[in-house]
Amino acid sequence: MSQPTIAEQAARLQFPPGFTWGSATAAYQIEGAVTADGRLPSIWDVFCRMPGRIMNGDTGEQACDHYHRLESDLDLMAELGLPSYRFSVSWPRVIPSGSGPVNQAGLDFYRRLVDGLLQRGIVPLLTLYHWDLPQALQNQGGWTSRGTVDRFVDFAVAVGQALGDRVPGIGTLNEPFCSAFLGYAAGVHAPGLTDRHAALAAAHHLNLAHGRAVSALRPITKAALSITLNLHQLYPASASPADLAATGHVDRIANRIFLDPILRGSYPSELLAETSHLSDWGFLADGDLAEISVPIDSLGVNFYNPSTIAARPPDQLAGSWQNDPDRTDGPTEWPGTDLAVAVPMAGPRTDMGWPIRPDSLTDLLLRLHRDFPGLPLYITENGAAFDDRPDADGQIRDGQRIDYLRAHLAAVHAAIAAGADVRGYYLWSLLDNFEWAYGYGKRFGIVYVDYPTQRRIPKASARWYADVMRHNAIDS
């Protein structure tokens, strides 16, 4: 392969030496095999069987059949030149009932995955929890119960003891905001509840589970420990005092409810006051915040789009808008609160209806740099869904995705140039997959999956991203 010319090199935005590149997936979205080798149902298996919950009645029963196609998928990663791969471990595969003995057959799958990555020179980044809570624990209250915290620590220790000697990075939770507020308040994710008090309790117990798991993992692994948050870059709909206050409120209930206890050892006092009509916060016990705020080695940041926030009109009753943050035809009540709404943004959108505003990623990263100086950051998810279809020659020319990725990587580069300590980027997603409530109707992958045949076809974006990773740079 020819080397880039001097002019081509000058036109590239170069990333720092040692910058980590990779791609990401999640267990329930790709593995399938939901009853194989002792695995028992998760909350998503049950949620998928509820009529009307998942688009087209889709389920994760087969997904990408990654469980049975592990070796060929690992070969595909190597062919694409992935330096690192972020995956999650299925709790109901490893400890099927959520508590009790480890299911060795399930754990062995992840041993094969990690060993296969290392044999191919791909660095594993392990996420313990990406939303697939064992249904048996949900039957006991799920994340509203402190007992689930203890069971999560048991799960973390089991995985840490089995894989912690050869996995250099472990993340505790992926996007606890979605687990708590989309699952327990908005009802659009499993377990499908609409109880704001329950959502606040779930958020706190997720924080506590993270902190206790970090403490339990420190003595048994040298892996760097982190958590991944889907942080929201928020803009007020106007300069009115009401909209400014609503934006501050959403920042507290969407971002600071996790950032502050984990990194500062406290919840925002304003948040406790603002939500007092929803909960007395009786689930917050003495000593919890000290356990939550144990040091972490880095912070994972998932980002797709920003939001514009307005105060809920006073003549509208709480719950007057459907709790669906993905609607774009009008204001939508922010999940977990009755005090603010998200207002649609003008401009280009992805197939999810999400606005494409790459500069907002720079804003978010610089905010984190200002608020938490010295904390290393990794982009653990960023990507876009588009309506990908093979051309007549069988190729998938997804130029819109390449444009999205190029612009967002340029935004990351701008944040680094301004001082943010961003050390890596994981593209979402490696494969088209089960996109939660959207079923198989949305495609985020840089590899096309023909679901009836399970054939994998790398898209144009896969070849483009391989060039980015190889040169540690993007064309500007």
Image: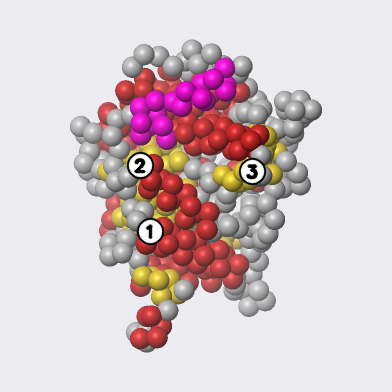
Q: Would you name the residue on which mark 1 appears? A: 418
Disc 2 marks a residue whose amino acid type is Phe
Residue drawn at x 52%, y 65% as measured from the top left? 407
Callout 1: SS = loop
Pointer 2 and pointer 3: residues touching (CB < 8 Å)? Answer: no
| For residue 194, side relative to residue 23 (left or right) | right
Is 426 placed above or below 14 here?
above
Disc 1 marks a residue whose amino acid type is Ala
Can residue 117 be seen? no
Circle nearer the viewer, 3 or 1: 3
Residue drawn at x 45%, y 68% as measured from the top left? 465
Residue drawn at x 39%, y 25% as measured from the top left? 266
Q: Mark 3 and mark 1: span between their CA atoms?
A: 27 Å
Q: Would you name the residue on which mark 3 appears? A: 239
The verdict on residue 473 being magenta is no
Callout 2: SS = loop
Mark 2, residues whose alpha carbon is within 10 Å: few (<14), some, or many (≥20)? few
Mark 1, residues whose alpha carbon is within 10 Å: few (<14), some, or many (≥20)? few
Mark toward the start of the polypeptide (2 vs 3): 3
Q: Position of residue 93 (x, y in %)?
A: 43, 35
Disc 3 marks a residue whose amino acid type is Ala
Dominant SS type (magenta): helix
Q: Would you name the residue on which mark 2 appears? A: 372
Residue drawn at x 32%, y 48% as measured from the top left? 376
Q: Position of residue 126 (x, y in %)?
A: 36, 45
Can residue 410 be seen? yes
